[in-house]
Image: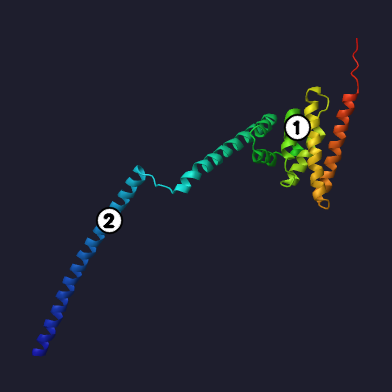
Amino acid sequence: MTSNLTSIIRDTTRSVLHDEITVVFRELLTTQKNDINNLLRQSLTSKSTISRTTTPIPTASVIASSPTITSTNSTLDTKQQHILKLARFGQLNQAFEYALSASDLNLVLYLCENVRPTELFSIQPCPLQTPVLLSLIQQLSADLNTYQELKYRYLHEALICLDLSHPSVRDYLQTVLIDLCKKLNTYIQANPSTTMAKRFQLLLMASQGLVQKIVQQRATPIIQTT
């Protein structure tokens, strides 16, 4: 009898304790959940307020260099978009004139990479005016150690399209061609066994031939008809 009572009391006590513990745990979990939600809400509100009202302070090195880099990239992107827009609308002379006048060889190369020389110079008459062609030759030949294939293709086509019949640009034309000959010869002498040296040799011969034609034109007297 006593044993049965003890067992009943033990089971009853366990049941009551289990129920109480369950209730307590539920209350604790609810409280913790509410606290966590409140903390998250406060944290998000705080971050949102900070992002709207303050700006992180960069280091001194970033302050000195970041505006220049950002401005340069932004300006370059704008110029690239502008010249490509001109080219797409068929304003090829304006596109190259703009790029060449920017005093930035990278911009010129960017345009050259996006306009195929064979298609550009196959248009008749040549869409690039003689002063633009001469400026293009001058800038592309400034350094023949980089972008050699691209520069060779453009220089080759540009030399073919040069018009020697305009006395107004003849002096400038001769100066540019003589300078091109010097640049080509310097590269060939420094790299005689390379593939590009053989190609540049062809450009050198063509440039020398054009210079000779200009000299002959100057030596030929102009016959005036009455």
Residue shown at 74% from the left, 28% from the top: 131
Relative placement, left or right, of 84 versus 17 is: right
Residue under label 1: 134
Residue shown at 48% from the left, 48% from the top: 61
Label annotation for residue 36: none
Judge by depth and name the residue closer to the eye, 144 or 73: 144
Residue 33, position as x, y percentages in the image: 26, 60
Q: Which quarter of the rendered picture does the C terminus lie within?
A: top right
Residue shown at 87% from the left, 35% from the top: 209
Q: Is residue 27 above or below residue 178?
A: below
Residue 91, position as x, y percentages in the image: 67, 29
Of tags 2 and 1, the one toward the viewer is 1
Amino acid on which disc 1 is placed: Leu
Packing grade of label 1 (10 A; few <14, some 14-19, many >=20) is many
Residue 132, position as x, y percentages in the image: 72, 30
* Residue 84 in sight from this viewpoint: yes
Describe the element under mark 2 as helix, strand or loop: helix
Packing grade of label 2 (10 A; few <14, some 14-19, many >=20) is few
Q: CA distance from mark 2 to mark 1?
A: 70 Å
Judge by depth and name the residue closer to the eye, 101 or 5: 101
* Residue 129 in sight from this viewpoint: no
- Report which quarter residue 5 is drawn in: bottom left
Residue 220, position as x, y percentages in the image: 91, 23
Relative placement, left or right, of 126 versus 34 is: right
Describe the element under mark 1 as helix, strand or loop: helix
Relative placement, left or right, of 226 versus 23 is: right
Judge by depth and name the residue closer to the eye, 9 or 170: 170
Label annotation for residue 39: 2
